[in-house]
Image (spheres, rainbow, N blue to C red):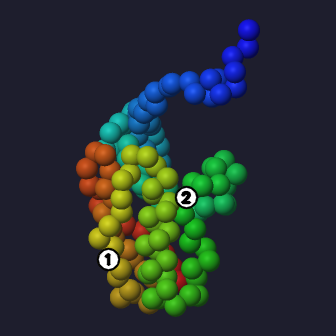
Amino acid sequence: MIPAMGNFLKQDFEMEEQPGLTYRMDLDGDGVRGYVDGREAVKQAVFRILQTERYQYIIYPWWYGMETIDLYGEPVEWVCAELERRITEALLVDSRITGVTDFVHDTSVKGVVHTTFTTHSIYGDIPAEREVNI
């Protein structure tokens, strides 16, 4: 006997969070050495997300990375506000990241916006930065 469609859709299930174990990137060199988990894995994820230009690499899904190419030539005030929105949007895709705050923009170098901020994660706060040419 086939169950009624309404009963079929009301199945109980539990969501289980997958571990964050990943390869350890050697950010100073050019390699991968060992594994990381927890806070260090999130720190790496923040770095990779912010350094990957969204929509430019077919290996990454459409939602991964951050758009920066179109910021070139735009007014500094607009770029600063847009960076806050784009950084937050890009990072919140990761379920381990709970928020992004404390943005500070350094525009002392002509044609460059250097942004520092705090990434809040389930493993604690992680200071981060991103620089873009405008």
Q: Considering only order in the chain, which callout, 2 or 1, is on the residue closer to the N terminus?
A: 2
Q: Is residue 6 left or right of 77 when viewed as pictured?
A: right
What amino acid is found at the position of numbered circle 1 in the picture? Answer: Val
The reply, left or right, for residue 36 in relation to residue 64 is: left
Indicate which disc residue 131 carries: none
Q: Is residue 98 above or below residue 17?
A: below
Image quadrant in which the N terminus is located: top right
Residue at 32% in and 77% down: 104
Residue 64 falls left or right of residue 105: right
Q: Residue at x 31, y 46 (%)?
A: 122
Using the image, determine if residue 55 lies above or below residue 11.
below
Image disc number at residue 104: 1
Q: Amino acid at mark 2?
A: Gly
Question: Residue at position x 50%, y 68% from top?
Answer: 86
Give the Cα separation between the discs numbered 1 and 2.
21 Å
Residue furthest to the top in view is: 1
Q: Is residue 27 visible?
A: no
Percent position of residue 123, x then y: 28, 45
Q: Position of residue 45 (x, y in %)?
A: 44, 49
- Which quadrant of the view contains residue 6? top right
Residue 62: name its quadrant: bottom right
Circle 1 Cα neighbour tier, 10 Å, few/some/many (<14 / 14–19 / ≥20):
some
Q: Secondary structure at mark 1?
A: strand
| Position in image of residue 21 (x %, y %) | 41, 33
Q: What crowding class fits label 2: few (fewer than 14 Cα within 10 Å), some (14-19), or many (20 or more)?
A: many
- The residue identified by callout 2 is 65
**Position of residue 30 measured from the top left corner of the image (x, y, whole percent):** 47, 48
